[in-house]
Image: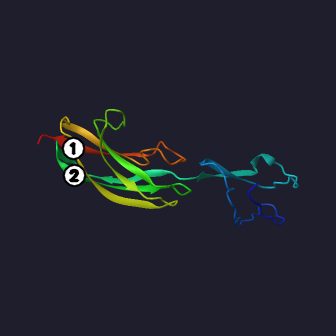
Amino acid sequence: MLGSRAIPALAPGATSSGSTTVTIPAGTATGNYYIIAKADADNVVAETNKGNNLYYWYIQVGPDLVISALSAPSTAAVGATLTITDTTKNQGGGGADSTTTRFYLTASTVLDASAAVLGSRAIPALAAGATNSGSTTVTIPAGTATGNHYIIAKADADNVVTETNKGNNLYYWFIQITVN
């Protein structure tokens, strides 16, 4: 139990609103949780329906790193140097240690072994809700086929932070690769 609050006697149809400060226990593993509030928690009131006494609220315990913004030129030639600007955000409920955001060039929005690494940027430790923005200069690799490609940015590219959700670490940007 995280906490409770006393409720005065209530007339039919009446409500009681209030706040209760709770502390997530130390050592709680990173993950997705629910805080559940139970009316008449001690079962002292005779009610017509005990089945509706629960209400829940979803919370994340621990960090969740995402790319919240990404931009680059919409066209570039093979061998060209360009600047990628990104914002890495910790949208979770706990602090994240230092990480790396890495940038890839690929022919699809799927990050797989065929993606070429363009570069990376060091991200400092981020408190819950904090962001870090920066720019990285990269070069389109020689031998890249012309046509439609994507720049994919991956937060926590080396998977060093235990996050509430690893499935949201990618963000992509469409880019047309042309001949030099």
Q: Are marks 2 and 1 in contact (CB under 8 Å)?
A: yes
- Residue 126 position (above or below residue 58): below
Q: Which mark is residue 132?
A: none
Residue drawn at point x = 66 percent, y = 52 percent: 27
Q: Which mark is residue 140?
A: 1
Residue beneath label 2, please? 82
SS state under label 2: strand
Q: Quadrant of residue 136?
A: bottom left
Coloring scheme of the render?
rainbow
Q: Position of residue 56 (x, y in %)?
A: 67, 51
SS state under label 1: loop
- Inspect the image, locate mark 1, and give the three-letter code of the amino acid beneath it: Ile
Dot placed on the residue nearer the N-terminal end, 2 or 1: 2
Residue drawn at point x = 69 percent, y = 65 percent: 21
Callout 1 environment at 10 Å: few (<14), some (14 to 19), or many (20+)?
Answer: some
Callout 2 environment at 10 Å: few (<14), some (14 to 19), or many (20+)?
Answer: some
Q: Quadrant of the N terminus?
A: bottom right
Query: In front: 47, or 118?
Result: 118
Residue drawn at point x = 31 percent, y = 32 percent: 114
Residue drawn at point x = 76 percent, y = 51 percent: 53
Q: Position of residue 107 (x, y in %)?
A: 28, 35
Q: Quadrant of the C terminus?
A: top left
Would you say 99 lies left or right of 50 here? left
Query: In front: 11, or 143?
Result: 143
- Inspect the image, locate mark 2, and give the three-letter code of the amino acid beneath it: Leu
- Residue 48 position (above or below residue 20): above
